[in-house]
Amino acid sequence: MKAPAPGVWTARVLTLFPQMFPGPLGMSLTGRALERGLWALEPIDIRDFAFDRHRSVDAPPAGGGPGMVMRPDVVAAAIDHADAGLSREEWPVIYLSPRGRRFDQAMARRLAACRGATLLCGRFEGVDQRVLDARGVEEVSLGDFVLTGGEIPAMALIDATVRLIPRVLGNAESTQEESFSSGLLEHPQYTRPTEWEGRAIPEVLLSGHHAKIAAWRRAQSERLTKERRPDLWRALSEGSADPEGEAELSDAKTSAATGGQKKDER
């Protein structure tokens, strides 16, 4: 595997469907940034590391059950290829899985500060646990739902990370005032026309009084966070930056604890 270009954040994606990339990542701001070399994308076909002429990557699950499981020897060979000579501190290996730690803005900032990341996209019933343990793979979830594979979550993680790279958005302030940048949801946004379908822009936003505008936006962010994400609000009130510290189990965690959720499609 060639070394990543110096100073260029690189996403290496281990997938059975490399043709899915760049997909949406090749459009709009991320696409333009990709063309300008502000970040790099390297899809890697896991089937290239199969050991037989049929390019087999899966086998029936041990202990019986439906579906197939991705083989540890094939996945390990793909990871080792992508991971060669790189430090996990500066280049984490991530498996997109609904049982992983929930992805959030803090994690996006951590990844953006790295040299890059290798993202493992599962399929079928998931990946043999032994390779995840042996290679120290970090499991990350986008939320309490299950998809058919890890490619779409990988794209979402890359998008959230790449937009934090300097010059990708073109306006650093955009990333400082949005949802989760301060642990709160973002305040409502308005633009022209001043009145639309009988609905007017709040007067304070037209006042030109920057201190009052900032106070209004902060109050709105707090109100929305209390109403829509009480878990975030409680975490902030308790001085914790990690909402995962909540005592109650999410639906997915409850389901996983009782054996009711497929573990590793995402």
Image (spheres, grey):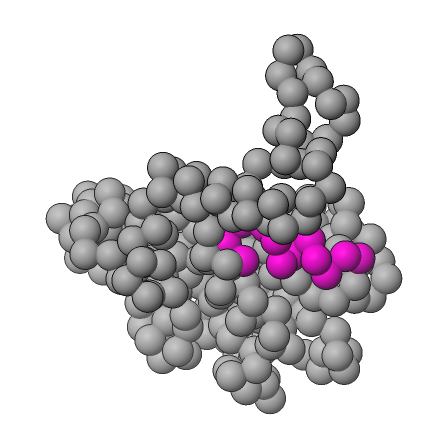
Q: Is residue 96 left or right of residue 202?
A: left
The part of the image, by quadrant, that contains residue 38 is: bottom right
Asked if residue 94 can be seen in this view, the reply is yes
Q: Residue at x 39, y 57 (%)?
A: 102
Nearest to the observer: residue 117 or residue 38: 38
Magenta-drawn segment: 170-181
| Residue 184 horizontal/vertical position (percent) | 46, 51
Residue 93 among those drawn in magenta: no
Q: Residue furthest top?
A: 197
| Residue 70 horizontal/vertical position (percent) | 40, 59
Asked if residue 61 can be seen in this view, the reply is no
Q: Residue at x 41, y 70 (%)?
A: 138
Quadrant including the N terminus: bottom right
Q: Residue furthest left?
A: 258
Q: Is residue 26 left or right of residue 125?
A: right
- Up the image or down, 180 lies above or below 132; here it is above
Q: Residue at x 54, y 58 (%)?
A: 181
Q: Residue at x 31, y 49 (%)?
A: 231
| Residue 165 horizontal/vertical position (percent) | 70, 66
| Residue 112 horizontal/vertical position (percent) | 61, 69
- Up the image or down, 13 lies above or below 248; here it is below
